[in-house]
Image (spheres, rainbow, N blue to C red):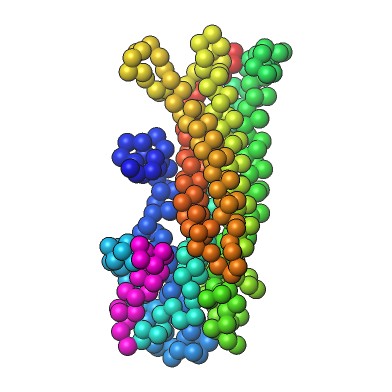
Amino acid sequence: MNDVFSHPWLGGLFQDAKAAAIWSPDRQVAHMLAFEAALTRAFGDVGTLPADVAKDVAETIADFSPNFAALRSGTARDGVVVPALVQQLRSAVGPHAKAVHTGATSQDVIDTALALTLRETNDHLKNSLETTLAALNDLTATFGANQMKGRTRMQVAIPIDVADRIVTWSAPLQRHIERLEAIRPRVEVLQLGGAVGNRAAFADNADAIVENVANRLNLLSTKSAWHSTRDAVADYANLLALITGSIGKMGQDICLMTQQGIDEIVISGGGGSSAMPHKQNPVLPELLATLARFNATQVAGMHHAMLHEQERSGAAWSLEWMILPQMAQATARSLSAATEICSRITRMGS
């Protein structure tokens, strides 16, 4: 069964098309090829390869279309996709096979592809956060002065303005934009450490090669590899859960506001019922609550994935592959659904 983000019909509810494209297999391979091409070009720049050879090999890598069936069988054998990919690349460049992947390790390729993916994801999330925040501000401008019953512990308290309710949805989003900007320099980072993370295979050229590759990929560089230090990745997962949690609060509130007898909000285009035609279910607000709970449960898994033994891990590392892509897609969908809800609201308060 496909996951809900790519499922033939569940994807209609759960998928954010742009996030799905960012995390697609084709895009991941493109990032891996970009890393390999940049590394080969760096060899030419520091003089460990003739410049013309480095250029020709890098161009071959950049234009390469891998055999995905072979990548699949190779991953089943090796536990990672990179050995099979490198084998195909070396066959493609022929006599200059040693110009491909020299000094790097599989984790360098996959983690750098992750960093490139997170950079694209961050651009998308920032834009989505700003769009959702603007939509909420528009609601405040339209309905903010209307009155509604304030509720504490789900019991009627005293009257509030609609703006008082909306600000509890919008204020966290501004903070999340700031959090996202703050974390970008810690996750949009080149991974290049070689077999045990100490860059020994690059000898005296290590610093120059790392800086060269980082500049070519528009990523930051670090003095050491982050093969087994995953705190930044776990912190990023925390941020994703914070975003969906804040949006989920909005969804939960709206679900309650739509209840018959409360009727504090009207949303056009709601969900129908197969058994009760009179119903208009709050499908998208419910989705926001679901996605918030989904990401909250995944954070624990990302903290388990911090436990990398010694210099590199297979078990902890691959756990990230199962969790982080879905968390990112859930976050993107949460924001796009929230914006859509705002566009459908025709009344709030009275």
Q: Relative to 208, does residue 144 appear above or below in the rendering?
A: above
x, y percentage for residue 286? 49, 27
- Quadrant placement of the N terminus: top left
Query: As rendered, which of 313 and 290 lies closer to the eye?
Result: 313
Q: Is residue 2 left or right of residue 190?
A: left
* Total count of labels: 0
Question: Residue 58 magenta-drawn?
Answer: no
Extreme right residue here?
A: 158
Tell me where the magenta segment starts and ends, as one range. 75-95
Query: As rendered, which of 255 and 322 lies closer to the eye?
Result: 322
Q: Relative to 268, does residue 41 appear above or below in the rendering?
A: below
x, y percentage for residue 312? 55, 67
From this viewpoint, is residue 326 visible? yes
Query: As rendered, which of 66 and 130 lies closer to the eye?
Result: 66
Q: Residue at x 46, y 81 (%)?
A: 102
Q: Relative to 54, does residue 138 appear above or below in the rendering?
A: above
Q: Residue at x 32, y 74 (%)?
A: 88
x, y percentage for residue 82? 40, 69
Extreme top residue here?
A: 261
Query: As rendered, which of 215 and 273 lies closer to the eye?
Result: 273
